[in-house]
Image (cartoon, grey):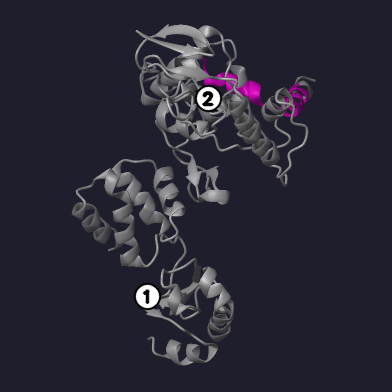
Amino acid sequence: MITLFIDNQKVAVKEGTTLLKASEKLGIEIPTLCYHEGLPPYGACRLCVVEIIGEKKNRMVAACSFLVDEGMKVLTISDRVLKRRRMIVEFLLARCPDIKAIRDLADKMGIKKPRFKTKNLDCILCGLCVRVCNEVAGIGAIGFVNRGKKLKVDTPFHLASDVCIGCGACSFVCPTGAIEMELDAVKRFRELLGIEHKCRYSLMGLVSYKVCSNNYECWRCKVDQRIRDSLATHPIFAAKKIKTEKVNQYFSFLKKIQE
Amino acid sequence: MKFNKIDKILEKFNMQKSQLISILQDIQNEFNFLPMEVLGYVAEKLGIPFSLVYHLATFYKTFSLKRRGRHLINVCLGTACHIRGGVRILEKIERDLNIKSGSITLDSKFSLEVVRCVGCCSLAPVIRIDDDTHGRLTQGKITPMLKKYE
């Protein structure tokens, strides 16, 4: 066990835990955007920045990926930390002013209007969707494209992906709701709400509802299972992320059919 | 065929995923650019996602996904060349070849690209055609120089 001090509170954790997990144990909240429990830490958003008191100089590190050390002294709400976090949120707010997750963060930190030129984007480039597609689903249908200010998440050559299995994991993990599932896909997911893990082929209507010729053991089922284990929920619930407008449209559409 | 050459390149690097950048460089030397189907073939052969190969190919400026001409003209518009009139050199070349930067001539002889600093600012303004560097240029030197290239 390793003992360290976070905001002058003593805590003992196992070797190899991150600062974020250690402060979670004390009940100290550190804001994050690119962190997800089902995925290895990445350190892209830098929102979880904390200050480590050193002998000569204090260091600023990302709490989500920095490992604990014996006798370490950490500050999670020092002036320097708050200043840096405010700056990051201000940049994010300038990038995507309409996103609720960012707005909430900005409100918490008392930022009303960013000083910078505003863009109207959805994606904050945290890389969660790319990582979940690569590491959890093991598909790699989407990836980063270009670099610098042209960086975006896209499929190769902006074509409809032939490897995507429509699991909806990318949409589920997205903190801003930039990735939406298409309505047809949601329809299939919605029919299955309440029923747990099911074969993807039966979702698509390729095999009859309760019979699977592969005994539910093909790789697509395994992908679903892995997503379920890692994200602690089924990608079906990605449907909840869809904007309410679209869901309402969908419901009115259903009503029309019933009439 | 196309893919035989790629197989040779892949064998040269022992099908190692970590050598992806070198593989792409060799393919670019072979074809002058990175064709779409070749990228897909490489991803399939190495067993890595297509999106990763595409990410690398778009990340580095050396790689081009568009077709390039037989000769690549790099016009430097770094700070030194910009001050010494690199823009005027670029305009002259654009007029001579009748294309804009980032495109290719109709006979696919030249393709024209703008770069930031080729690392010899004392020769400013500089352009680079394939591997030859031409420095201290004026607009008058451009036309006879381009005629030398087949």
Judging depth in this view, the residue of A213 and A178 nearest the camera is A178
Do the residues indicated by labels 1 and 2 lie within the same chain of the protein? no
What label sits on residue A50 in the rendered view? 2
Q: Position of residue A76 (x, y in %)?
A: 56, 20
Q: Residues within 10 Å of mark 1 (few under 14, many from 20)?
A: few
Question: Is residue B144 left or right of B96 when viewed as pictured?
Answer: left
Where residue A66 sits, quadrant-wise, is top left
Judging depth in this view, the residue of B140 and A87 nearest the camera is A87
On the image, numbered disc 1 is attached to which residue? B130
Residue drawn at 74 percent across, 31 percent down = A111
Circles 1 and 2, Cβ within 8 Å, touching? The answer is no
Q: For mark 1, name the chain.
A: B
Q: Residues within 10 Å of mark 2 (few under 14, many from 20)?
A: many
Where residue A31 sits, quadrant-wise, is top right
> Does the magenta run of residues contain A246?
yes
> Does the magenta run of residues contain B147?
no
Question: Is residue A228 left or right of B98 when viewed as pictured?
Answer: left
Q: For mark 2, name the chain.
A: A
Residue drawn at 61 percent across, 38 percent down = A123
Q: Secondary structure at mark 2?
A: strand
